[in-house]
Each structure stands twice: as structure tokens, then as C-alpha cells.
């Protein structure tokens, strides 16, 4: 199985936009409430397993918690887990 994580942040919200000539552009964007969410999961050849979403960035403690509580219970004898170069 392949294990990977990805993240999204509210800082990716555009702060500017376009409108038709003579009209005002109106939209909402979080102001000063920047946050991020991380999604991690394992991909088997036939399914996605052990999905987990956390508020904030991944770190060593959260990764260890993920492995112990989410990933390990889904492992079967003979499974091989391949990770990317997650710095934490």
C-alpha cells in the first residue's frame, strides 16, 4: 500500500477577482482566520484505507498517532507500506 498526505489551506482563497465593466466584484474570503487541514490515507491496489483528516499541519506526534490508531489496525500479514519523504 502507498501512504501519502496532502493539505489545504484557507490562504489559497483569492483576495481579488474580476467583474463585468461597471459592476462591483463581491465575494467572501476569511480575513485573519487562516487555517489548514491535512488528509492522509493509504491506497491499496483495490481500495483506499485508513483515511484521516486533521486540523493543522502534520507533525511527528500526529503521524505516530495516525499509524497507531488508523493504519495499524488495517494492516494484514505480508502488507508492504511505502511512504513518501514526509519531513515530520
Image: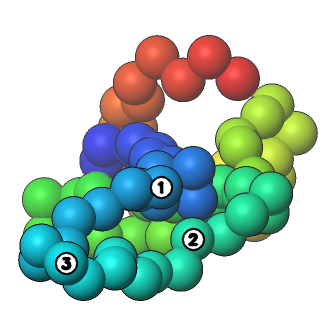
Q: Secondary structure at mark 1?
A: loop
Residue 48 horizontal side relative to residue 81, left or right:
left
Q: Nearer the viewer, residue 76 or 38?
A: 38
Front disc: 3 or 2: 3
Residue lying at 47% horizontally and 55% vertically, measured from the top left: 15
Pointer 2 and pointer 1: residues touching (CB < 8 Å)? yes
Dot 1, crowdedness within 10 Å: few (<14), some or many (≥20)?
Answer: few
State the residue lying farthest toward the front: 22
Where is residue 35? Give x, y as percent: 72, 57
Q: Which residue is mark 3?
A: 22
Question: Dot 2: few (<14), some (14–19), or many (≥20) neighbours within 10 Å?
Answer: few
* Residue 4: percent from left, percent from top: 40, 42
Residue underneath mark 2? 29
Q: Secondary structure at mark 3?
A: loop
Can you tell which quarter of the image residue 18 is in? Answer: bottom left
| The label number, if any, that marks residue 15 in the structure image | 1
Q: Is residue 77 visible?
A: no
Task: Classify mark 2: helix, strand or loop.
Answer: loop
Q: Nearer the viewer, mark 3 or mark 1?
A: 3
Question: Which residue is drawn at the image coordinates 53% and 80% (left, top)?
Answer: 28
Pick whichever, 30 or 66, lies toward us: 30
Q: Quadrant of the C terminus?
A: top right
Q: Earlier in the sequence, mark 3 or mark 1?
A: 1
Point out residue 39 in the picture as x, y percentages from the top left corner.
52, 59
- The CA distance from mark 3 to mark 1 is 19 Å
Quick check: can you spot residue 87? yes
Tell me the residue at 44%/81% (across/down): 27
Amino acid at each position: 500500500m502507498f501512504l501519502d498526505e496532502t493539505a489545504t489551506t484557507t490562504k489559497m482563497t483569492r483576495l481579488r477577482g474580476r467583474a463585468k465593466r461597471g459592476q462591483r466584484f463581491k465575494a467572501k474570503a476569511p480575513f485573519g482566520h487562516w487555517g489548514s487541514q491535512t488528509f492522509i490515507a493509504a491506497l491499496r491496489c483495490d481500495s483506499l484505507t485508513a483515511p484521516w483528516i486533521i486540523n493543522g499541519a502534520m507533525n511527528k506526534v500526529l503521524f505516530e498517532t495516525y499509524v497507531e490508531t488508523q493504519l495499524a489496525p488495517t494492516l494484514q500479514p505480508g502488507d508492504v507500506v511505502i511512504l513518501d519523504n514526509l519531513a515530520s
